[in-house]
Image (cartoon, rainbow, N blue to C red):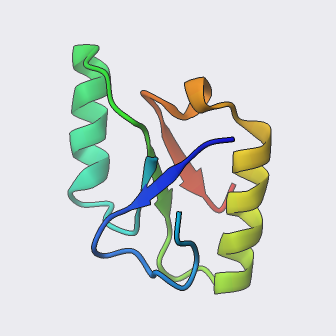
Amino acid sequence: MVRLLTDENFDQTIVRVRAILTHDISTLVPDAEQLILQGAPMAGVIFVFDQLQIGRAINDLEIALECYSESEIRNAITYIPL
Protein backbone atom coordinates (compact mmCIF):
# COMPACT_ATOMS: atom_id res chain seq x y z
CA MET A 1 0.00 0.00 0.00
CA VAL A 2 1.23 3.48 -0.84
CA ARG A 3 1.49 5.95 2.07
CA LEU A 4 0.49 9.53 1.35
CA LEU A 5 1.60 12.93 2.60
CA THR A 6 -0.39 16.06 1.78
CA ASP A 7 0.94 19.56 1.36
CA GLU A 8 -0.55 22.55 3.16
CA ASN A 9 -2.79 23.50 0.21
CA PHE A 10 -4.49 20.13 -0.10
CA ASP A 11 -8.11 19.72 1.03
CA GLN A 12 -7.65 17.63 4.19
CA THR A 13 -11.20 16.25 4.01
CA ILE A 14 -10.13 14.06 1.09
CA VAL A 15 -7.47 12.05 2.90
CA ARG A 16 -5.46 12.04 6.09
CA VAL A 17 -2.65 9.72 5.18
CA ARG A 18 3.84 9.28 1.41
CA ALA A 19 3.60 10.46 -1.97
CA ILE A 20 2.82 14.17 -1.84
CA LEU A 21 -0.80 15.08 -2.60
CA THR A 22 -1.33 18.57 -3.93
CA HIS A 23 -3.70 20.93 -5.69
CA ASP A 24 -0.69 23.20 -6.44
CA ILE A 25 0.10 22.67 -10.12
CA SER A 26 2.14 25.87 -10.39
CA THR A 27 4.82 24.95 -7.82
CA LEU A 28 5.04 21.27 -6.92
CA VAL A 29 4.43 19.82 -10.37
CA PRO A 30 7.21 21.85 -12.09
CA ASP A 31 9.57 21.05 -9.19
CA ALA A 32 8.74 17.35 -9.50
CA GLU A 33 9.22 17.49 -13.29
CA GLN A 34 12.65 19.04 -12.76
CA LEU A 35 13.64 16.32 -10.28
CA ILE A 36 12.50 13.64 -12.73
CA LEU A 37 14.54 15.22 -15.56
CA GLN A 38 17.60 15.35 -13.28
CA GLY A 39 17.11 11.74 -12.23
CA ALA A 40 16.89 12.81 -8.58
CA PRO A 41 14.86 10.56 -6.27
CA MET A 42 11.56 11.84 -4.91
CA ALA A 43 8.55 10.43 -3.09
CA GLY A 44 6.21 11.10 -6.02
CA VAL A 45 3.53 13.72 -6.54
CA ILE A 46 -0.18 13.11 -6.94
CA PHE A 47 -1.86 16.20 -8.36
CA VAL A 48 -5.59 16.42 -7.71
CA PHE A 49 -7.43 19.10 -9.67
CA ASP A 50 -8.99 21.38 -7.07
CA GLN A 51 -12.25 21.71 -9.02
CA LEU A 52 -12.85 17.97 -8.79
CA GLN A 53 -15.76 16.90 -6.59
CA ILE A 54 -14.58 15.34 -3.34
CA GLY A 55 -16.31 12.02 -3.99
CA ARG A 56 -14.66 11.70 -7.41
CA ALA A 57 -11.28 12.70 -5.97
CA ILE A 58 -11.53 10.05 -3.27
CA ASN A 59 -12.69 7.39 -5.74
CA ASP A 60 -9.89 8.09 -8.24
CA LEU A 61 -7.34 8.28 -5.46
CA GLU A 62 -8.45 4.87 -4.15
CA ILE A 63 -8.17 3.41 -7.65
CA ALA A 64 -4.68 4.87 -8.13
CA LEU A 65 -3.50 3.57 -4.77
CA GLU A 66 -4.89 0.10 -5.46
CA CYS A 67 -3.46 -0.08 -8.99
CA TYR A 68 -0.02 1.45 -8.50
CA SER A 69 2.71 0.07 -6.28
CA GLU A 70 4.78 2.38 -4.12
CA SER A 71 7.69 1.97 -6.55
CA GLU A 72 5.45 3.08 -9.45
CA ILE A 73 4.32 6.21 -7.58
CA ARG A 74 7.87 7.09 -6.52
CA ASN A 75 9.70 9.37 -8.97
CA ALA A 76 6.51 10.05 -10.93
CA ILE A 77 3.65 12.53 -11.22
CA THR A 78 0.12 11.12 -11.17
CA TYR A 79 -2.87 13.27 -12.14
CA ILE A 80 -6.33 12.89 -10.62
CA PRO A 81 -8.86 12.55 -12.23
CA LEU A 82 -7.36 9.49 -13.86
Residue at the spot x=61%, y=42% of the render?
A: 2
Name which quarter of the figure residue 22 lies in: bottom left
| Count of labels in the image | 0
Percent x, y of residue 19: 46, 46
Residue at the spot x=59%, y=79% of the render?
A: 52
Examine the rendered structure and indicate whether residue 3 appears above or below residue 74: below
Percent x, y of residue 76: 46, 32
Examine the rendered structure and indicate whether residue 15 appears above or below residue 77: below
Q: Where does the N terminus fall, quadrant-wise?
A: top right
Residue at the spot x=60%, y=32% of the render?
A: 70
* 81 sits to left or right of 27: right
Residue at the spot x=54%, y=45% of the render?
A: 78
Q: Where does the C terminus fall, quadrant-wise?
A: bottom right
Name which quarter of the figure residue 33 lies in: top left
- Residue that lies at the very extreme toward the top in this rendered image: 39
Percent x, y of residue 50: 47, 78
Percent x, y of residue 58: 69, 72
